[in-house]
Image: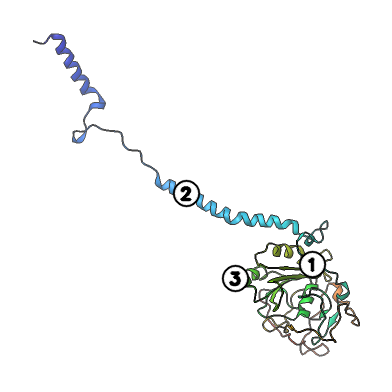
Amino acid sequence: MPSSNASKSAKAVRAAGKGSPSLKKGGGGKSRLPGKRQIPWMAIGGAVVIIALIGALAYSLVPKYRDQADLEKFTPSAQKKDPSDQIEGVLKKDYAQGAGKHVEPTQRVAYDQTPPFGGPHDSAWAACTGVVYSKAIRSENAVHSLEHGAVWIAYNPDKVDAAGVETLSKKVEGKAYTLMSPYPGLDKAISLQSWGHQLKLDSPDDKRINQFITALRQNPYGVYPEVGADCSNPYFDRENPSPFDPSPVGPDAVPMDGSGIVTDPAELSGSGGVPAMPNIPGVPSLPTGLAPAPVPGQ
């Protein structure tokens, strides 16, 4: 017979088992186990999307801010009147003798550079209100635009593909005091001109293009003759401008110093003169290559 103490111990064990929560049985006769911890996938996914968006914005904006900061040193100021001095490859020449000297629409100038970037020029300037010309334009009209403070981007259509033309166009379209046109036979892919300045390049992605434009477009510190002159010319035909003539000039071409031509005082006053108007008594007729044309967006 089991002892009285052993019987009491067995009863105590059974009682303890019944009262212990960890040993109570739940549904199905199985012990209850702690539930599994759920992973917050939606929260993690949202965080990943936000991080990706921040990364994309940074990738897009940081280079633009960096480029803008880099261009600051090419912005003209009273202390740094001609920042193009810091741009590698810029050719500079003094064309003061040719400022304000006009040739006739049928005359040509014996320009000393190709494309020209200073000297005597036609009385009508090529519209330079962010105009991208699809045809080559007469040099004498383009040089007058430079006298007004414009930057002229010329490109060789045989050396710049459609994507390159599009890249260059974005630097001109809608930008005041800029113009762009093909220039057949150009010795480089691209040539930038402002009055007295030129930069020839091989690639439309060259960072010096923006540097040149920043430094010289409407630079007010005496780098071009007609500060304050207008660049719009609604009478210059954008679709069929005065034709470009690639042939060598003849002996009757106007020399670079414009000898024999009286300087137009209105040209040097900053007024820019008035383009010839058609069919108005007492006013010169419209020169060849000029026709009333709309000024889109101006």
Of mark 1 and mark 2, the one earlier in the sequence is 2
Please give the count of numbered marks on the rendered protein.
3
Q: Earlier in the sequence, mark 3 or mark 2?
A: 2
Task: Rate crowding at label 1 as few (under 14), some (14 to 19) or many (20 or more) other CA atoms within 10 Å.
Answer: some
Closer mark to the observer between disc 1 and disc 2? 1
Which residue is the site of mark 2?
Answer: 48
Disc 3 to disc 2, C-alpha distance = 35 Å
At numbered mark 1, what does the secondary structure look like: helix, strand or loop? strand
Q: Residue at x 47, y 51 (%)?
A: 49
Seen in the picture, residue 191 relative to 55 is either above or below; the reply is: below
N-terminal label among 3 and 1 = 1
The quadrant in which the N terminus is found is: top left
Task: Relative to 24, say whether 248 is above or below.
Answer: below
Mark 3 near mark 1, Cβ–Cβ under 8 Å?
no
Q: Position of residue 186 (x, y in %)?
A: 71, 75
**Cα distance between the residues tagged 1 and 2:** 52 Å
Mark 3 crowdedness (10 Å alpha carbons): few <14, some 14-19, many ≥20:
few
Within 10 Å of the Cα at label 2, are there few (<14), some (14-19), or many (20+) other Cα atoms? few
Judge left or right: residue 230 versus residue 25. Answer: right
- Mark 3 or mark 2, whichever is nearer to me: 3
Question: Which residue, given by chain and number where applicable, does mark 3 sit on?
Answer: 163
Reply above or below: 251 against 75: below
Q: Which mark is residue 91?
A: 1
Depth check, mark 3 against mark 1: the one in front is: 1
240 is higher (above) or lower (below) than 128: below
Q: Give the residue type at disc 2.
A: Val
Under circle 3, the secondary element is helix
> Quick one: 120 or 149, which is closer to the camera?
120
